[in-house]
């Protein structure tokens, strides 16, 4: 059983801060809930993923294989000097 601690609690094999969600046995969880020290955390089933139709694709041309011209190549390397390690 999963519970959410309402107060700080500690014991043999158990430690929780207020608001912390922990897994405990059914008997221990029922006792803590009855004493007002915790509330049960009910987990909802995971939502089902929506099924999407495959998108229609168009033929796309291959990307251009352009290289930098001489002006752009001369600017490379300028900027901050490398960091010392």
Image (spheres, helix red, strand yellow):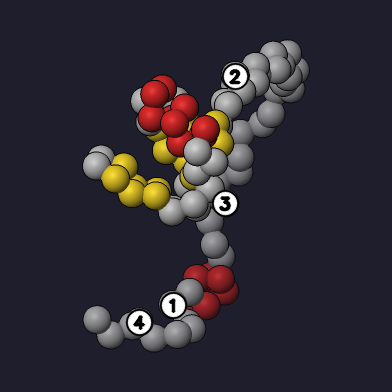
Q: Nearer the viewer, residue 51 or 19?
A: 19
Q: Name the residue under label 1.
A: 77
Tell me the CA gap for discs 4 and 3. Answer: 28 Å
Of marks 2 and 1, the one in the foreground: 2
Which labelled disc corresponds to residue 82?
4
Chain-order first, disc 4 or disc 3: 3
Instruction: Decide: few, some or many residues near mark 2? Use Cα within 10 Å; few <14, some 14-19, many ≥20.
Output: few
Tell me the CA gap for discs 2 and 3. Answer: 52 Å
Of marks 1 and 4, the one in the foreground: 4
Chain-order first, disc 2 or disc 1: 2
Instruction: Decide: few, some or many residues near mark 1? Use Cα within 10 Å; few <14, some 14-19, many ≥20.
Output: few
Q: In this view, does 74 lie above or below 30?
A: below
Which labelled disc corresponds to residue 66?
3
Q: Quadrant of the N terminus?
A: top left
Q: In which quarter of the image is the C terminus?
A: bottom left
Contact flag, marks 4 and 3 (Cβ < 8 Å): no
Q: Is residue 54 visible?
A: no
Q: In this view, does 37 lie above or below 84?
A: above
Chain-order first, disc 3 or disc 1: 3
Chain-order first, disc 2 or disc 4: 2
């Amino acid at each position: 059983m999963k519970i959410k601690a309402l107060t700080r609690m500690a014991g043999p094999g158990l430690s929780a801060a207020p608001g912390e969600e922990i897994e405990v046995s059914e008997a221990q969880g029922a006792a803590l809930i009855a004493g007002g020290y915790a509330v049960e955390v009910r987990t909802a089933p995971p939502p089902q993923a929506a099924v999407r139709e495959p998108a229609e694709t168009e033929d796309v041309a291959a990307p251009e294989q352009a290289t930098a011209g001489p002006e752009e190549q001369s600017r490379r390397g300028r900027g901050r000097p490398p960091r010392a390690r």
